[in-house]
Image (tube, rainbow, N blue to C red):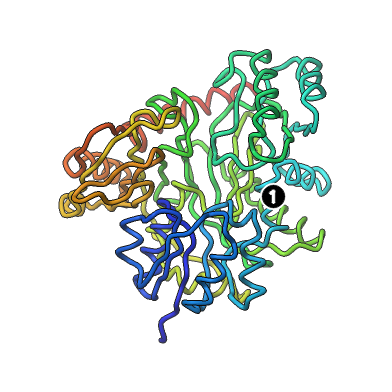
C-alpha cells in the first residue's frame, strides 16, 4: 500500500504523539511553533513558523504537498486554518472555524445545548458587561464557576471554593477578565458549581459518523492530592476496559449522547464538524454535566489514547477526510501519562533543563512525548510550560504507573523540574471512587 504524506501543525506533546503514530506507516512533515526535538527527529522535513500565521501554514503545505493535513492545537483552528487549507485543495483533519466555535466561544456551545435540549447541560449564563455578570452572581447566591468565553489554554477557569475563596473573589475575577481581555472575546460565562469527578471522552468524527475513544481522567491541578492552581494538565490515566471505575454505564451513555447531540445540532445549523471532538465532563450526584467542548485532541489525553490504537492512525485520518469513518479499535490496556514541568509552572516561568536517557526509559516499557523543550547541546531547555511527558501502557495499571514513575526517576535528570507522583496510583483512583460514592449517596 502506498505511503500517505501528512503535514502536522503544532509543536507540543499532543502533536509529538500524533507524529510518532503517523510516522510508523507514513511520511510526516511538520509546521512547528518551536523546534520540538522529538518531532524534528521523526519528520521528513519541518519548518518553524508563527502560530498565528495562517498564510505561512498554507504556504508550507503548498511546498510539501501533503495528502492530509492534521491540526493539533486550538488557536489555528479558531483562526480558520482548515478553511484556508481546504480552499487550497488540502484535505484536513480538523473542523472549520464555524464548527470549532464550540471551543473558541464557550457561550455558543451552551446556547446550542439549550436550543436543542442536549443532555449534560447545566446552568450557564454569558455576559458582555461585567456589571451584569456581577449582579447575576449576587442574585444567584450560590458558589459559581467563572470562565472567559474565549480560549485560555486550559488555564482560565476559576471555581469558588477551589481556586476562588468566595463569590466576592469571583466578582473580582470577572473584572480582571474584562480588564485584561482574557480569552479575547470580552465575554464571561457564569455557571453553577458542580461537585464530582472530572473525566474526558474523545471521538473521531467524519461529519456524520463518530467513533469514541477510551475514557481518560486528567489531573489539572499543579500539585499532589489535587492542590494548587489549575494547569493545562499534569497527567492522566485510562483503564484497560476503556471506562473509569467511578462512572456508571448510564453516565457514559449520557456523555456519548451529549457529544453526538452537539454534532447533530451543528448540522441542523448548517455546520459540518469533522476531526476530533473532545468532551470534558463533571459527573455529580445526578449524572454527567458538560464542562466544555474542545475541537481537537486533549493534551495530555492524546498521549493516553493514541498509543493504545490497534488501528493505523493514518488510515483513521484518511477515513475522516473521506467521510468513511468506521469503528476505531483500541487495545484493552491501561495508560498512564505524567508531565514533567518547570518548578514554577503554571504561575512563574522559572528556568530549568533536562537530560533524558531514552534507553533507560525504554527499559521500563515507557515512552517520551517531547513538548515545550528545545535542544541546547546535550541538554533540553524547558521553555516555561509542560516540558515533556513520560507515558506507558500495560494491561495492569499498577505496572503502567510504576513504569512511568521509575522511568522518570532513573531516566530523567536536570534542574528546576517536578512532576505529580500520584497520577495513576491505585490510592489516587480509590480516593476518586470513594468520593464519588459519597456524592451519589446524597441523591
| Residue 326, picture quadrant | bottom right
Q: Nearer the viewer, residue 297 or 120?
A: 297
Q: Residue at x 72, y 32 (%)?
A: 188
Residue 308 location (% of width, % of height): 39, 58
Q: Residues within 10 Å of mark 1 (few under 14, many from 20)?
A: many
**In this rendering, position of residue 114 left or right of residue 443:** right
- Count all numbered tags in the image, as a single digit: 1
Query: Which one is in front, 125 or 286?
Result: 125
The image quarter containing residue 24 is bottom left
Which residue is at a point 37% across and 58% down the rendered structure image?
Answer: 307
Q: Is residue 75 left or right of residue 435?
A: right
In the image, residue 173 above or below residue 5: above
Quadrant of image for the N terminus = bottom left
Q: Does 80 sit above or below residue 299?
A: below
| Up/down of 189 relative to 358, above or below | above
Residue 285: x, y in percent? 63, 29
SS assignment at label 1: helix
In the depicted view, which residue is nearer to us: 166 or 197?
A: 166
x and y, in percent, of residue 220 in the image: 47, 34
Q: Position of residue 101 (x, y in %)?
A: 70, 51
Quarter of the image with the C terminus in it: top right
In the image, taking residue 241 as reference, residue 267 lies left or right, namely: right
Question: Would residue 236 be found to the left or right of residue 121 on screen?
Answer: left
Residue denoted by label 1: 102
Residue drawn where x is 80% and y is 21% of the image: 131
Amino acid at each position: 500500500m502506498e505511503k500517505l504524506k501528512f503535514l502536522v501543525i503544532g509543536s507540543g506533546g499532543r502533536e509529538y504523539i500524533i507524529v510518532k503514530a503517523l510516522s510508523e506507516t507514513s511520511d510526516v512533515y511538520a509546521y512547528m511553533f518551536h523546534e520540538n526535538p522529538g518531532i524534528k527527529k521523526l519528520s521528513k522535513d519541518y519548518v518553524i513558523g508563527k502560530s498565528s500565521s495562517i498564510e505561512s501554514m498554507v504556504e508550507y503545505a503548498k511546498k510539501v504537498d501533503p495528502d492530509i493535513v492534521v491540526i493539533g492545537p486550538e488557536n489555528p483552528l479558531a483562526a480558520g486554518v482548515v478553511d484556508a487549507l481546504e480552499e487550497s485543495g488540502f484535505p484536513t483533519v480538523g473542523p472549520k472555524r464555524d464548527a470549532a466555535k464550540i471551543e473558541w466561544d464557550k457561550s455558543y456551545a451552551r446556547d446550542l445545548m439549550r436550543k436543542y435540549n442536549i443532555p449534560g447541560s447545566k446552568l450557564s449564563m454569558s455576559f458582555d458587561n461585567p456589571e451584569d455578570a456581577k449582579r447575576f452572581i449576587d442574585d444567584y447566591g450560590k458558589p459559581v464557576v467563572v470562565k472567559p468565553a474565549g480560549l485560555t489554554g486550559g488555564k482560565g477557569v476559576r471555581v469558588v471554593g477551589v481556586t476562588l475563596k468566595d463569590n466576592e473573589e469571583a466578582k473580582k475575577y470577572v473584572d480582571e477578565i474584562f480588564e485584561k481581555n482574557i480569552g479575547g472575546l470580552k465575554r464571561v460565562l457564569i455557571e453553577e458549581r458542580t461537585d464530582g469527578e472530572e473525566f474526558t471522552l474523545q471521538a473521531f468524527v467524519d461529519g456524520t459518523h463518530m467513533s469514541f475513544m477510551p475514557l481518560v481522567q486528567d489531573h489539572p491541578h499543579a500539585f499532589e492530592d489535587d492542590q494548587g492552581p489549575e494547569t493545562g494538565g499534569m497527567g492522566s490515566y485510562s483503564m484497560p476496559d476503556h471506562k473509569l471505575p467511578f462512572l456508571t454505564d448510564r453516565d457514559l451513555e449520557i456523555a456519548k449522547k451529549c457529544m453526538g447531540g452537539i454534532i447533530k445540532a451543528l448540522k441542523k445549523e448548517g455546520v459540518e464538524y469533522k476531526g476530533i471532538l473532545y468532551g470534558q465532563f463533571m459527573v455529580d450526584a445526578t449524572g454527567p454535566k458538560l464542562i466544555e467542548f474542545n475541537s481537537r485532541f486533549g493534551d495530555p489525553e492524546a498521549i493516553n489514547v493514541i498509543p493504545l490504537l490497534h488501528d493505523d492512525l493514518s488510515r483513521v485520518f484518511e477515513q475522516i477526510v473521506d467521510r468513511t469513518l468506521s469503528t476505531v479499535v483500541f487495545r484493552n490496556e491501561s495508560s498512564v501519562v505524567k508531565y514533567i514541568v518547570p518548578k514554577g509552572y503554571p504561575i512563574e516561568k522559572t528556568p530549568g533543563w533536562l537530560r533524558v536517557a531514552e534507553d533507560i526509559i525504554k527499559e521500563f516499557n515507557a515512552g517520551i512525548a517531547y513538548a515545550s523543550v528545545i535542544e541546547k547541546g546535550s541538554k533540553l531547555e524547558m521553555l516555561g510550560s509542560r516540558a515533556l511527558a513520560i507515558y506507558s501502557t500495560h494491561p495492569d495499571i499498577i505496572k503502567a504507573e510504576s513504569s512511568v514513575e521509575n522511568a522518570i526517576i532513573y531516566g530523567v535528570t536536570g534542574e528546576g523540574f517536578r512532576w505529580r507522583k500520584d497520577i495513576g496510583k491505585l490510592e489516587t483512583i480509590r480516593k476518586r471512587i470513594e468520593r464519588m460514592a459519597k456524592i451519589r449517596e446524597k441523591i
